[in-house]
């Protein structure tokens, strides 16, 4: 079972939640940022040249995000009601792995459990194993013909 701790949410922050709820009803502007990752990519290339275990940029970025969340856990916590924060000890990361199935590119979800406790190499191995794993028709949900209720669901607005 996943371990977690419960913290009281500061009363001074409840007004912030109310403002956020009101803000959801207004128009908003999406921001776009640009980051220079050339030094990080170079360090990954150097590591891959000197090591038998190769790491990917995706594994590196997952590791960086998990280490940051471990240090600053409040923003990644779950708000229960208006006065309790649930902070999980484990960080599970969900990513999409692209696979080629019957000549068609298909997105397959992968959950990396306890990503905050494993190394970049272990994360990279999990991603590569998911890419290389042979899938059967039972593994792919949408391979079956949709029944009547599913077809109605897809037509809903």
Image (cartoon, rainbow, N blue to C red):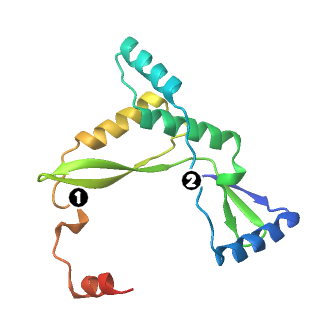
Give the number of marks.
2
Quadrant for residue 55, please give it. Answer: top left
Percent x, y of residue 14: 81, 69
Q: Is residue 153 left or right of residue 84?
A: left
Seen from the viewer's position, the closer of residues 39 and 78 is 39
Going from N to C along the chain, the mark reached first, 1 or 2, is 2
Residue at horizontal 54 percent and vertical 55 percent from the top: 1
Q: Is residue 117 positioned above or below 154 on the image?
A: above
Residue 16, image quadrant: bottom right
Q: Position of residue 153 (x, y in %)?
A: 32, 84
Residue located 58% across and 60% down the image: 30
Identify the residue position indicated by label 1 in the image. 139
For mark 2, does the 10 Å Cα neighbourhood hold few (<14), some (14 to 19), or many (20 or more) residues? Answer: few
The residue depicted at 87 percent of the width and 66 percent of the height is 11
Left or right: 104, with 85 as reference point: left
Image: 17 above or below 137: below
Q: Quadrant of the C terminus?
A: bottom left
Q: Residue furthest top?
A: 50
Mark 2 secondary-structure assignment: loop
| Residue with the most extreme left position | 102
Q: Gap between marks 1 and 2, in whole Å?
A: 26 Å
- Which residue is label 2 attached to? 2
Position in image of residue 56 (x %, y %): 39, 31
Would residue 17 be found to the left or right of residue 55 on screen? right
From this view, report whether residue 118 is shown above or below residue 87: above
Label for residue 123?
A: none
SS at mark 1 in the image? loop
Q: Residue at x 20, y 83 (%)?
A: 147
């Amino acid at each position: 079972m996943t371990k977690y701790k419960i913290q009281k949410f500061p009363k001074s922050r409840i007004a912030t939640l109310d403002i956020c709820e009101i803000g959801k009803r207004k128009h908003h502007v999406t921001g776009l940022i640009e980051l220079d990752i050339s030094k990080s990519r170079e360090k990954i290339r150097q590591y891959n040249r000197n090591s038998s275990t190769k790491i990917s940029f995706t594994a590196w970025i997952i590791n960086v995000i998990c280490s940051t969340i471990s240090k600053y856990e409040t923003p990644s916590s779950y708000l229960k009601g208006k006065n309790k924060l649930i902070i999980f000890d484990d960080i599970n990361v969900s990513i999409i792995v692209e696979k080629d199935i019957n000549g068609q590119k298909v997105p397959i979800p992968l959950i990396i459990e306890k990503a905050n406790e494993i190394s970049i190499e272990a994360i990279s191995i999990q991603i590569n194993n998911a890419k290389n794993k042979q899938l059967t028709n039972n593994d792919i949900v949408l391979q079956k013909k949709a029944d009547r209720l599913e077809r109605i669901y897809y037509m809903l607005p």
